Image (spheres, rainbow, N blue to C red):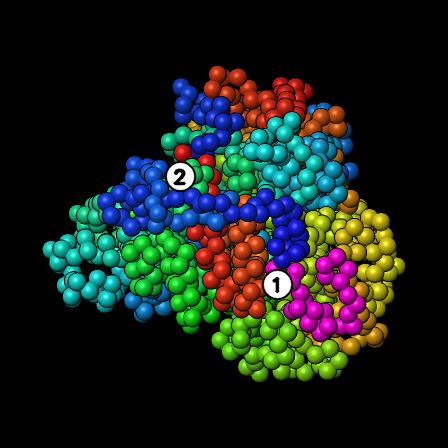
Amino acid sequence: MRGMGSAVLLGSALCTGCYSGVNVGAGGGGDTDGGTANQGDSDDGSGGSGSDPDAPELTCDTVGTQPLRRLSSAQYWQVVDTLLPPALAEQAREVGVFPETLIEDGFTTFASANRVSTGESERIEDNADNIASLFREDIGTYAPMLVPCIGDSLAAETVDGCMPDFIDAFGTQAFRRAPTEAERALIQGLYEQVRDDDGVEEALTAVLQFFLQAPGMLYVTEPGLATDDPSVVALSGHEIATRLSLLFLDGLPDAELLTAAEDGSLLTPEGVEAQARRLAGRAEVARAMTTFHHEWLRGFSLDGADREHPLWDEDVSDALAVELREFGRWFIEDTDGTFRTLLATDAFPSDGRLNEVYNAGDPTASPRRGLLTTAAAMAAAAHSDSTSLVERGVFIRQHVLCAPVPAFPGDIDIEGTLGDYGDLPTARERLEPLMLEPSCAGCHVGINPFGFPFEAYDWVGAHRLEENGATIDTTTDIDIGVFAGDFANATELVLALSESEMAEDCYATHWFRYAMGRHETDEDVCSLEEIREAFAASEGDVRELLVAIATSDAFRFRSTGGAE
Amino acid sequence: MRRRRFLQGLGGITVGLPFLSKFATRSAKAAGDPNGPRRAIMMAYPMGTHVPFFSPTATGSSFDFGAITAAMEPFKDRTLAVTNCPNGVLDLVSDYVYGHPGKKESVFTGTLMRHAFGGDGTNHVDNVIQSSPDGHQNTANGPSVEHVIGQFLADESHMRASVDLGIPGRQVGEIVDSAFFYEAAENPVSLQANPGVAFASLFSGVTPDGEVDEAFMTLQRRRKSVLDAVRDSFTDLRQGLPPADRAVLDDHADKIREIELDLQPPLACTIPDAASEDESAYEGWSMGDFADLQIRLMAHAMACGVAPVGRLEFYDQQNPFFGIPLVDDAVATVQDWHHPVVHAADGWEKDGEVRVTGLRFFVDKFALLCAELDAIVEGPDGRTALDNSLLMLGSDLAEGDGHAARDLCFLIAGGTGPGVRQYHFDGSGENVNRLLNTVLRMACVTDEGGAPVDDFGLQGFAPGAISELLV
């Protein structure tokens, strides 16, 4: 155990030891994925209760229940880019109306962010229809690219002959596994029905339209492989390959990963680790870095944002909206990729568009350090014409240290509560009295001290020394037990955070959430402990953190959640 | 032009909802109640009203409308006003006393938000827990009343289950989740807030002279074949998954089914003038402009028999542009209209002209809906679409200042069903749940055994109907 992490994050530690492991039942007939958890339902073979000495073994007592995830909008488009000819994929984005994933909680990878409402189901269908119509309009150009087997012929007998292989190959890519016999028959049936009604061009279009909204493509289903513990299934090779590709590449498995899924090597921790290390070294891992850091720091709140500020213009708006993504890319490509660097670096990527913001005020008074003091991070946690001391405080406490914050009480009569204090010049002066007001202190005592230092940055992230003519006091005194100290300004605070085990653990927890698409549960305590320890042992290497997540029990197994 | 669907579908919704399954549907019966309405249309607006100006001058059948409800005068003989009606379920959770949480969600559903229930969320008063809204599960824990009416009235003549339109405050929208209306627990209705998309969905495929567009039908055929295959593929995919995962897939498959049901030949009927799907066509539009157009589309669609239920929702409670200079000029001086003005803070008097004019707006638009429907004659007996409808107007609050929900005000209009008549009822001794039970009686909704439905919303909380209203 590394101290405070589990207690703060999960409240209880159900799993402190390891046991002999759960064995996957022997699969049938040389299928390296083994038997599925659902006996008799699948083409993968039958699940069984016997033990296999080469089968995956749990090192933890429990693993969490994994909700069914659907691809996020970013992942969907990444998949479309891979599946379609480039020219068609480019136009597809222009006509596409795939519902954008909106974060309510956590990350865009969360199952809860991708539930399908009635409106979203319509958009998914509309999106497929729009792209298919695009294909249909220029089918003479696109069909040979999509189905090379047909050459330049759209004669029915030619396309008929190519269709089974096309369904198999395209389906394997789209579904991240080979289509089942039932799926092959279904798609072939669709093709033949539309061909007979309206001709081969319509039929080929219909097949593409199907794939673009097929649940096998949209959903990350994980029936898993039966183990000798009925409450746990091991993920199959293809299921692990999908999790790996979504985590590291934000898209489809590459060829080597699919091969590993086929040959069974992903059923061992060593095999998963080897693939995870390979993927961590690929350039595409920058996608995960950009998405994660953008969403962790709530960069999406800057999309379409408006700020009443003399430095605000279109360039600044655009640059702020992408700064956190760019920071994530730069961090993994151009630094040592460690947590400490992420929070403490004094170098920043820049295309020059934010120079005025970064040079405002007296930058030397509180030199910026790391991601948390980027202009975008500050602007994201701000109002249109003022800072948000509370929002910033909540962010640091809850999202950087994973310390609990009481639930927001809803609609508050802010002006009435502030009373005469509302006329004081600085946000600190206005909000400090709330730390003494009984009905407010429960929240504000724990939140405000984390927000005070960041008042040195205004609502576009520019440095400032004064607010309404009064000097801004950036000092703070924080004491939440394992993280405590007096800090003169944001620089000192973020440097302390960069050295903090609590913050490092919290960062690992957020990556766990991003990877799993859900919050951690008590059943994940053991996996999380191992992940945090591996992260710490690597001196905070973020690539190693991802490898540790990928090799964890939580990643390779899941609770059956009451499967029948 | 292809039809893009946005409306709620028939069927599927009752899966896993034993509460709803006990209701009969009209198609399951030999015939509907000939005295009941053909359709129900609900209109919801945020932030409440000014109760003294909303209330008619006297209770009973002889009254004058208040300043806010004056526009209903032409329909007085078919209007029931209910005032001062407490939304009692909100008293069950202390966090609902102040602010907005739970208020929109409860007013037409008669229940609390999902987070206020323990365990599996059983929608019963005994399962209510003290729980703060937490950013999750903050949608109603049951369907709204018109959804139940819709299920009862639906039959094979309807293209779909409902017509659901959102009214933007100042900028054209598209799909918006309703805060007031729900198909089921945690399943808000999707509102279409782009009038052009709504028009296309409702009326494309029909030429102005009633001809069917063949190219449109060809496209529909392909879509239907694809959707059939997509829906079937869910069946294969769900095997071997945990129940919770299967439920997610089943829910999506149900929604695919709803889209398929939309792919019906268009109804032959009189269609209104086309509305543009191009958002730029709505530059500078006010909430009043959007309301007028969406109300017209709603009236025509419902008179065409597209669906048994319609919903209209004013969903911008922050900063709408009314299109009324007196109001817009005044509220332009404050950041968000609703807090300082509707909450009557910062010197905005409760009965001041600006505030009352803004609040009257919503009743004016309800009166417009009545007028549009009343202009459409249905059948040789001269009865109008209004005569054959059940309409209801409601809001989440009573007096906006203080977020009060103890004295809500409603208007119910139409010309059929028990109780819908010229009447003003002081509901101070009643509560919203019993009013909703009464509305179900007005729509002649019964359970499978033909008995009235008298425990809608939060089960076990306030069963029974308000007998004074049912004459």
Q: Which mark is residue A228?
A: 2
Q: Write the residue at 52% across / 34% down.
A: B147
| Residue A85 spot, x, y in % from top left | 29, 67
**Subunit under mark 2:** A
Please state if A454 lies on the left or on the right of B7 as rendered. Answer: right
Range of the magenta residues?
Answer: A479-505
- Where's residue A432, x and y in %? 83, 61
Quadrant placement of the C terminus of chain A: top left
Q: Looking at numbered disc 2 in the image, what kind of residue is underneath it?
A: Asp
Q: Identify which residue is drawn at 59% across, 30% down.
A: B123
Is B242 above or below relative to B444? below
> Which one is in front, B29 or A80?
A80
Closer to us: A461 or B471: A461
Magenta segment: does it hold A504?
A: yes
In depth, the one of B329 and B428 nearer the eye is B428
Residue tagged 1: A504
Tell me if residue A143 is in the magenta stretch. Answer: no
Give left or right: position of B192 versus B461: left
How far apart marks 1 and 2 lie (CA) works out to 36 Å
- Give the residue drawn at x 78%, y 38%: B52
Q: Position of residue A542 (x, y in %)?
A: 53, 67
Say whether residue B128 is visible.
Answer: yes
Establish if B452 lies above or below A439: above
Q: Residue at x 71, y 26 (%)?
A: B430
Q: Earlier in the sequence, mark 1 or mark 2?
A: 2
Viewer-nearest of discs 1 and 2: 2
SS type, badge 2: loop
Look at label 1 and name its amino acid. Answer: Glu
Please give the chain letter of the residue carrying mark 1: A
